[in-house]
Image (cartoon, grey):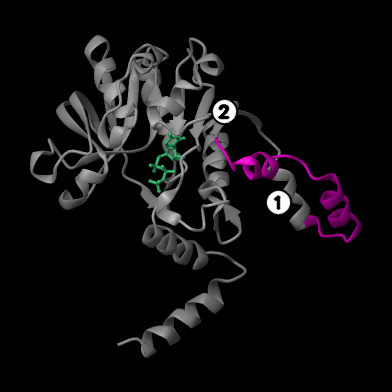
Amino acid sequence: MKVRKAVIPAAGLGTRFLPATKALAKEMLPIIDKPTIQYIVEEAKKSGIEDILVVTGKGKRPIEDHFDSVPELEQNLKDKGKTDLLKLVEQTTDINLYFIRQSHPRGLGDAVLMAKDFVGDEPFVVMLGDDIMEDKVPLTKQLMQRYEDTHASTLAVMKVPHQEVNKYGVIDPAAQTKPGLYDVKRFVEKPDVDKAPSDLAIIGRYLLTPEIFQMLETQKPGAGNEVQLTDAIDRLNKIQRVFAHEFKGDRFDVGYKFGYLKTSIEFGLRHPEVKDELRAYIKDLSKKIK
Ligand code: UTP
């Protein structure tokens, strides 16, 4: 069955960005001039995803507004002949987006469970707004290509520095069935550094079969007292194979302050409008900093 649907959980509290995220959705924080969630939606579009469900929560209304049309703004840009800006604005509405609210942020697993009716009995993709991924073939597309082969759930993983494994879901890999595609013995959420089964961490893209919902419906809270998607995937792996696909592209983790800052600088150094000034500024600044 073709993968057509994606779910973007965006109902978290974003506590790592407080106080900015007190009233503002973390997914709306811009990297230069684009909210982070738009990068995720664009990856879905490029991968051939047709329908996206965004799981939102309190204070997340601006996400819905961002992807809606604003006739007065569009007319104003048309009247002033600002066709480039008009194109940018129009691009934001060029996708089928649906919204559902998670009333209590009980964890990523609970947020994904909100998508049960939307997904039905199709395989689907979960895309986290914290991670912007770049590669020649979008990561979501890479997972969809793997699925054509395996017809099984496949998660994206990436090698991370060993001392950081306790921030992630980590896999205990078995053999590689194909280069870069692992059979997995078990999935562990936020293991202690000295107990982690590998340095292969689950990053923010998951292709899942609909059987995951049976697991999520009975999933007890785990690490951080949250319903963990990783725990449900570990149980799914006991009734059907779940694979891990190693991502070799670039990952920009914008879910914490320093990652957000690094991504802003790197994307700024490529942005046609600001790159020259920014490069000159950084050079100048680095002379001042000892
Ligand atoms: P995170 O833990 O990275 O996001 O969850 P957070 O909770 O918003 O941020 P911090 O840790 O407090 O700073 C990963 C993703 O899962 C979503 C978040 O919105 C984020 O995109 N999520 C998390 C939900 O949708 N619902 C939840 O109950 C928890």
Q: Which quadrant of the view contains residue 235? A: top left
Examine the rendered structure and indicate whether residue 91 appears above or below residue 3: below
Which residue lies at the image location 86% right of the left edge and 49% below the top edge?
Answer: 72
Q: CA distance from mark 1 to mark 2?
A: 22 Å
Label 2: how many residues lie within 10 Å, few (<14), some (14-19) or many (20+)?
many
Judged from the image, the secondary structure of the residue bearing numbered disc 1 is helix
Examine the rendered structure and indicate whether residue 1 appears above or below residue 112: above
Q: Which x, y percent locates residue 107? A: 39, 32
Label 1: how many residues lie within 10 Å, few (<14), some (14-19) or many (20+)?
few
Q: Which x, y percent locates residue 186? A: 18, 25
Report the magenta residues as a range: 57-83
Residue at the bottom extreme of this rendering: 288
Is residue 198 found left or right of 92 in the rendered image? Answer: left
Three-letter code for the amino acid on which mark 2 is drawn: Leu
Is residue 164 found left or right of 82 in the rendered image? Answer: left
Q: Which quadrant of the view contains residue 66? A: top right
Three-letter code for the amino acid on which mark 1 is drawn: Leu
Which residue lies at the image location 65% right of the left edge and 45% below the top edge?
Answer: 62
Which quarter of the figure is the C terminus placed in?
A: bottom left
Q: Which quadrant of the view contains residue 96? A: top right
Residue at the left extreme of this rendering: 194
Q: Is residue 65 magenta?
A: yes
Which residue lies at the image location 37% right of the left edge and 49% below the top edge?
Answer: 251
- Residue situated in front as seen by the camera: 73 or 272: 73
Q: Which residue is mark 1?
A: 88
The dot on residue 202 is: none
- In which of the image's four quarters is ligand 1 placed? top left
Q: Which x, y percent locates residue 69? A: 77, 41
- Residue situated in front as seen by the camera: 110 or 205: 110
Examine the rendered structure and indicate whether residue 268 appears above or below residue 11: below
Q: Which residue is mark 2?
A: 53
